[in-house]
Image (cartoon, rainbow, N blue to C red):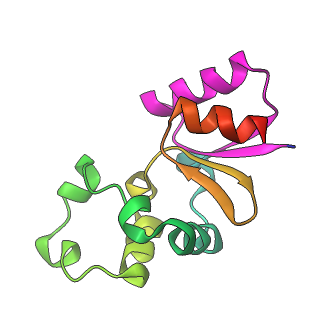
Amino acid sequence: MTLHIYGIKNCDTIKKARNWLDDRQADYVFHDYKSEGADAPKLTAWVSEHGWEIVLNRRGTTFRALPEADKHDLDPDKAIALMLANPSMIKRPVLELSPGKSIVGFDPELYDMALKG
């Protein structure tokens, strides 16, 4: 099983997650939003699976720097549009185990359970 991990190369949490996967010799492909961009169908699937409230990182500086009008009245479509325009607003990492099954954020226990199947 090849995993896909999505994030930004210089993110500390991404580094931790990738090191964790490397230590377990997990087979994965890394997708860097900065160089490869974000994908609308993936974001839509993750928002459907987890809810936009989980996928959209509202604690980061990019979100906090948005105009107040962009932060209000959020719904799935508006959140996806914001994340497509600003991929650094996507919570990191997203570990995609298979289509329709992913983990948002880095939790070693969840990763361990996912790798064990």
Between 25 and 10, which is closer to the camera in this rendering? Answer: 25
- Report the label total: 0
Q: Is residue 59 magenta?
A: no
Residue 53 location (% of width, % of height): 35, 66
Which quadrant would residue 86 be assigned to in this image? bottom left
Q: Residue furthest top?
A: 23
Q: Is residue 72 above or below residue 54?
A: below
Residue 28 location (% of width, % of height): 77, 37
Residue 38 location (% of width, % of height): 57, 61
Q: Which residues are magenta?
A: 2-31
Q: Which residue is rendered at x = 38% and y = 56% of the image? A: 89
Q: Is residue 94 shown to the viewer in this render?
A: yes
Decide if residue 67 is on the left or right side of residue 98.
left
Residue 106 location (% of width, % of height): 50, 37
Decide if residue 85 is on the left or right side of residue 99.
left
Q: Which residue is rendered at x = 27% and y = 53% of the image? A: 62
Decide if residue 29 is on the left or right side of residue 73.
right
Which part of the image, by quadrant, shows the C terminus? Answer: top right
Q: Which residue is rendered at x = 20% and y = 72% of the image? A: 71
Which quadrant would residue 11 be assigned to in this image? top left
Q: Which residue is rendered at x = 51% and y = 41% of the image? A: 8
